[in-house]
Amino acid sequence: MTRRAGLRSARWLLLLACVPAFVGSFHFSARTGVARRAKDDDRVNYMESPLGQFLGSIAKAMSDSPLNDAKIWFAQTQAGEYDEAAARGKLEDYIKNNKVLMFSFTKCPFCIKAKRELTDMGVPFTALDLDQMDQEGKELRAELAKKTKRTSMPNIFIAGQGIGGCNDGPGLLTLKKEGKLEPMLRDAGALA
């Protein structure tokens, strides 16, 4: 395979990794025949649908493959030129100074689901919506990608320990299902 064909393939696979978030951002009405911006409930329902689960598994497989380096490169490219040491310092301060910290995107269905889960459990947490933080958000995402080797959101920390996302890495929902989340939150002082 030529270098050019390899880059073209990597671009298509990178685009495919973005499909779950994009598709989950719209809702098609069969009654009106019009696509509209999805509400949070629509996004979560999409995430839990067979199509959402399938596309999520593709995105997870990509994060476990060498293509993950391309996703990290893309996050760094989006950030452009910046003071890496200062951004890394901010990132570490956020992680150190919050018992439960979630880096997220406002319209990401996995982020919405994770926020709801923590809220329903009565867990106080800090959510940093990187897509609402302009350049600082891009810099934090680039540094987060270097630190965790993950570019997807949410990216959750409990007592300074990265637990992954909503359902991957091992993930908030996986830890809850396995009975490990509540003890972890209690040990962090985030749950009575």
Image (cartoon, helix red, strand yellow):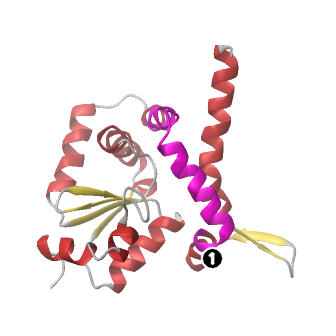
Q: Quadrant of the N terminus?
A: top right
Q: Quadrant of the C terminus?
A: bottom left
**Number of numbered markers:** 1
Q: Is residue 100 magenta?
A: no
- Residue 124 visible, this orientation: no
- Residue 112 visible, this orientation: yes
Q: Nearer the viewer, residue 58 or 45?
A: 58
Instruction: Please indicate whether residue 147 sits to the left or right of residue 185 in the image.
Output: right
Q: Is residue 50 magenta?
A: yes
Residue at x-position 19% and y-position 76%: 183
- Examine the rendered structure and indicate whether residue 116 appears above or below residue 169: below
Q: Position of residue 151 (x, y in %)?
A: 44, 46
- Examine the rendered structure and indicate whether residue 69 appears above or below residue 169: above
Amino acid type assigned to the residue bearing label 1 in the image: Asp
Residue at x-position 33% and y-position 77%: 118
Residue at x-position 37% and y-position 63%: 171
Magenta segment main secondary structure: helix
Q: Which residues are magenta?
A: 47-75
Corner quadrant of residue 99 = bottom left
Q: Which residue is farthest top?
A: 2
Where disc 1 sits, the SS reads helix
Residue receiving disc 1: 42
Q: Which residue is farthest front?
A: 178
Q: Position of residue 144 (x, y in %)?
A: 33, 44
Residue at x-position 68% and y-position 27%: 8
Q: Position of residue 153 (x, y in %)?
A: 44, 56
Corner quadrant of residue 179 = bottom left
Instruction: Please indicate whether residue 52 sits to the left or right of residue 29 in the image.
Output: left
